[in-house]
Image (cartoon, rainbow, N blue to C red):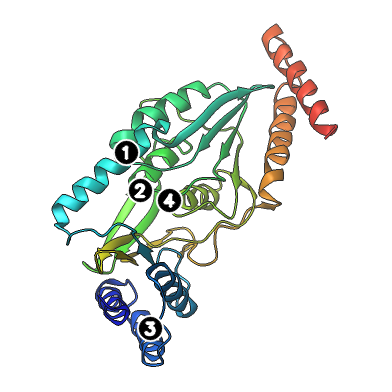
Amino acid sequence: MSNADTVTGALAQITAHYVFPERATEMATVVRRHLDDGRYDELSGPQLCTTLTDDLQSVCPDRHLRLIWHERARPAWDRADDDAGEVEARRERYRLNAEGIHRVERLAGNVGLIEMRGVGDPAWTASAYAAAMQLVAHTHALILDMRRNSGGTPDSVALFCSYFLPDKPVHLNDIYDGTTRRTRQFWTLPHLPAPRYLDRPVLVLTSAQTFSAGEEICYNLQAQGRAILIGETTRGGAHPSDTYQVSPHVDVRVPCARSINPVTGTNWEGTGVKPDQSCDAEHAWDIAYREALRHVLAATVDADSEHQVAVRVEAERALAELQLH
């Protein structure tokens, strides 16, 4: 298959499925001009994917829109078989990575920590989320480390966010599907298998690598006034996407829907989620832990039980150690 055929095939899928048809037309106009100029003629397969992705994003900087190169040639897709294979591959990846919950810990000073690196299907993640939330249920403050979260599914976003909001339904997000022209609403769940985490600080760590569904967790909690975000502006991918085969070696990932937050009326596409306190991602930990420990000290200032006093002493020592850094 020639490079020209690959470019033409990718444009056909983008034109047919991109959530903003007028932007798809703009991208096609620019790419066809480059094609006529011979820009893609001598490129290798990986170079073609990179260059064409850059050209598409120069017109429409959509973080999900891209071409993907596969070294090993693949037969033409049977969509149902391929979807099943992709789901099983994702299932294995999440199963071997604790369903995206990379770390759960009680830190000195009775501060909870959950590090989440992916957002899998709720059928897989529900028990892991419940276990994590049960372990941090009695902490005085919670740090959510989302700095390496690469995304996942909006259903699990709604499930996870439910733990931080009351049991009455809260409207978190809408997703408009450009193909069906239907809008699906996402709300918090009224019943959960572990305790909710309410009336205590939630500090979320972000980085420039935080992406997609990982960003939505940050955005939703910030929009609901339920968390303080600390770190870097996130990567900026808010459009759910689908993948289409262009050739035995090339797929194109096309955003086919868009998120609409009911509080802000918009989303984080292109702009990223902006933290409440900006700093380098590597420094976000110290800042968040310090804030959490200060809350612990404030909450235990009139402690009268030996256990609360022990927590306060622990928090004082932890804060003193941080001050030395």
Dot 2 and dot 1 residues touching (CB under 8 Å): yes
| 1 vs 3, front mark | 3
Residue type pointed to by label 3: Asp
The amino acid type found where label 4 is placed reads: Ala
**Mark with earlier residue (4, 2):** 2
Q: Tell which residue pokes out farthest to the right in this image.
A: 324
The dot on residue 213 is 4
Which corner quadrant of the image does residue 78 belong to?
Answer: bottom left
Which is more foreground, mark 3 or mark 2?
3
Residue for point 36% across, 92% down: 36
Residue under label 3: 41
Neighbourhood count class around disc 1 (C-alpha, 10 Å): few under 14, some 14–19, many 20 upward: some
For marks 3 and 2, give the CA distance. 37 Å
Label 4–label 2 contact, CB within 8 A: yes
- Whether label 1 touches label 3, CB < 8 Å: no
Task: State the residue at coordinates (28%, 81%).
Answer: 8
Compared with residue 239, is residue 148 higher up or lower down, i.e. above or below?
above
Asked whether, in this view, residue 274 is left or right of residue 151, the answer is: right
The answer to whether 175 appears left or right of 285 in the picture is: left
What amino acid type should be assigned to the residue bearing mark 2? Thr
Separation (CA) of disc 4 from disc 2: 6 Å
Which residue carries the number 1 mark?
122
* 87 w.r.t. 163: above or below: below
Judge left or right: residue 295 versus residue 71: right
